[in-house]
Amino acid sequence: MEYLNLTTPYGQTYEVCFEAERYANNHNLALQMYFKDENGMLMPFSTLTINLREPHEPNCSFVDTNDNPWAEKFITDNKLGKPTGRKMRSGYCEYPQYQFDLKEIEKYQLNAPKTKTKDKSRKRDEAR
């Protein structure tokens, strides 16, 4: 797993990674961010997405730009996704929808699906 550098508007830089899940009520993509602290421990940083009730495409989600004003630039600069042009209002905020590149996110994902490796020793034993 790799880390991305995130520099906030306040000049702080963090090494971050993701945990990708699905919201329970509608199965929309949920992205939780973690940062590596000075001891190398992973700590919760922010939830990048916001759960708006309406279900949508599996790799799309609305971005929480209210709590993360840097989010859109971070997503596009790191090629994690692109805006769909759709927005949804909740309360006093309007949230942009992004289509996320799940393969790109997987590089920085704590809970990325593991690929299966073939057991070469078993094949060797069968050949004898």
Image: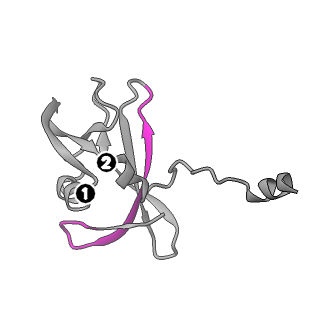
Q: Amino acid at mark 1?
A: Lys
Quadrant of the rendered image containing residue 78? bottom left
Q: Secondary structure at mark 1?
A: loop
Specify whether residue 92 is in view: no
Q: Are marks 1 and 2 in contact (CB under 8 Å)?
A: yes
Residue 76: % across, % down: 20, 56
Secondary structure character of the magenta stretch overall: strand
Q: Amino acid at mark 2?
A: Asp
Q: With respect to residue 95, does 42 lie above or below? A: below
Give the number of marks.
2
Taking 94 as reference, is 98 left or right?
right
Q: Which mark is residue 101?
A: 2
Q: Secondary structure at mark 2?
A: loop
Taking 80 as reference, is 35 left or right?
right
Residue 110: % across, % down: 50, 55
Residue 89: % across, % down: 14, 31
- Chain-order first, disc 1 or disc 2: 1
Quadrant of the rendered image containing residue 7? bottom left
Q: With respect to residue 126, does 53 lie above or below? A: above
Label 2: few (<14), some or many (≥20) within 10 Å? some
**Quadrant for the C terminus in the image:** bottom right
Residue 55 magenta: no
Tell me the magenta residue range. 6-24
Q: Nearer the viewer, residue 64 or 110?
A: 110
Which residue: 36% across, 47% down?
A: 102
Residue 4: % across, % down: 35, 66
Q: Nearer the viewer, residue 128 or 75?
A: 128
Rounded to the nearest whole Å, what is the CA distance between mark 1 and mark 2? Answer: 8 Å
Q: With respect to residue 39, does 20 lie above or below? A: above
Q: Which mark is residue 79?
A: 1
Which residue: 25% across, 41% down?
A: 99
Specify whether residue 19 is in view: yes
